[in-house]
Image (tube, helix red, strand yellow):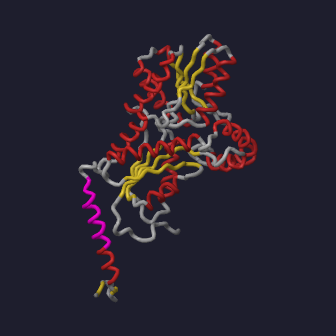
Amino acid sequence: MDYTARESFPHGEVPAVGVLVVNLGTPDAPDTPSLRRYLRQFLSDPRVIELPKLQWLPILNLFVLTTRPKKSAHAYQVVWTDEGSPLLSITRRQARGISEILAREVGTPTHVEAGMTYGEPSVGTALRTLREKGCGRILILPMYPQYSGTTVGSVYDTVARELTTWRVVPEHRFIQTYHDEPGYVGALAASIRDAWRDGEPEKLLFSFHGIPKRYFEGGDPYHCLCHKTARLVAEELGLADDRWVLAFQSLFGKEEWLKPYTADTVTAMAKSGVESLDVICPGFSADCLETIEEINVQNREFFEDNGGKRFRYIPALNDRPDHLRFLADLVERHLQGWVASPTEYDRDGAEDEARASKERANRLGERKPRADGGFGG
């Protein structure tokens, strides 16, 4: 196997730390060919579809990829912006926001890059960019508040596959979950309070992306983490138990997924006489197809077509200042021992050491190797 590395060992470079911000990914364009490429990569991930390849790949290639890309392309056209996919543009803004805070609060050179598990910019591309910037230590931040093997586990696999091709593997750390972090819960509660300045609804629905029930039964903790997040936010808001509901959305395939299903829940509430409903999706750190089109378009129609009067989608935390503040705090906490504050970091000393290292390397390069393996003048 050929291992990749920078052209030469980086003598004369001040050591830097990298932060990799990872989200799911997006097609290159809202058209059928792009969706086919994207879905092939996404649905070929064994973390996402836990079926034997001999059983799943014929279904994927003969049925799913011949029908779903066209339908998905139409949905993406609804949410596409001048910046491209909302998920990608928001994730990039989040990375920039985190970087700006770290630049003020961390003295050690620190670089932040955004990468996608599927599509571009890929995790591999982002990691190689951090390597070129001299990051010998890298923190991976999956932008999934609640751990699931289908998401965070897949990020780990993707990072690991890339690093197995590197000659020099960087020291790295991995944030697994932040579903109950006070800063995250507080930002969610604040976003709901902001929406409620125009009046509170009868019901608040927490809608999380679903996973197959058998994944949960096989040990995936996602279901429990979602419930804890919703409970903590409801407690922060002081909501009575009968004011809020939790459900799971974005079903795929014919097997049973985590219940109750969002579409069924929204429809049932409307039919039961609930006239006003707010929906928030705490499992999505950035708005995307599943929130903008599935929740705010499809589920809005389900609610209104069955008697509901007022449906309001509360946006994801995106690049809200309190969300960026929390994410930066989370990153800084996990960078402890790797970075120093601006007042503690000896920039001049680091630059002097880098110059001295380069000079030593240059002198060593001028010496000729002896037959015994040593060096002579």
Question: Does residue 355 show up magenta in the picture?
Answer: yes
Occupied quadrant, residue 301:
top right
Which residue lies at the image location 50% right of the left edge and 57% below the top edge? Answer: 162
Percent across and percent down for residue 210 are: 57, 33
- Image quarter of residue 190: top left
- Residue lying furthest top in this view? 273
Residue sitting nearer the eye, 82 or 268: 82
Q: In this rendering, is residue 98 above or below 365? A: above
Taking the image as drawn, is residue 266 in sight?
A: yes
Q: Name the one closer to the observer, 294 or 112.
A: 112
Q: Which of these two is toward me, 294 or 41?
A: 294
In the rendered view, does 81 fall on the left or right side of 148?
A: right
Main SS of the magenta part reads: helix
Q: Judge left or right: residue 355 versus residue 310.
A: left
- Residue numbers of the magenta segment: 345-358
Q: What x and y, as percent, mark residue 112? A: 43, 50
Q: Is residue 361 left or right of residue 66?
A: left
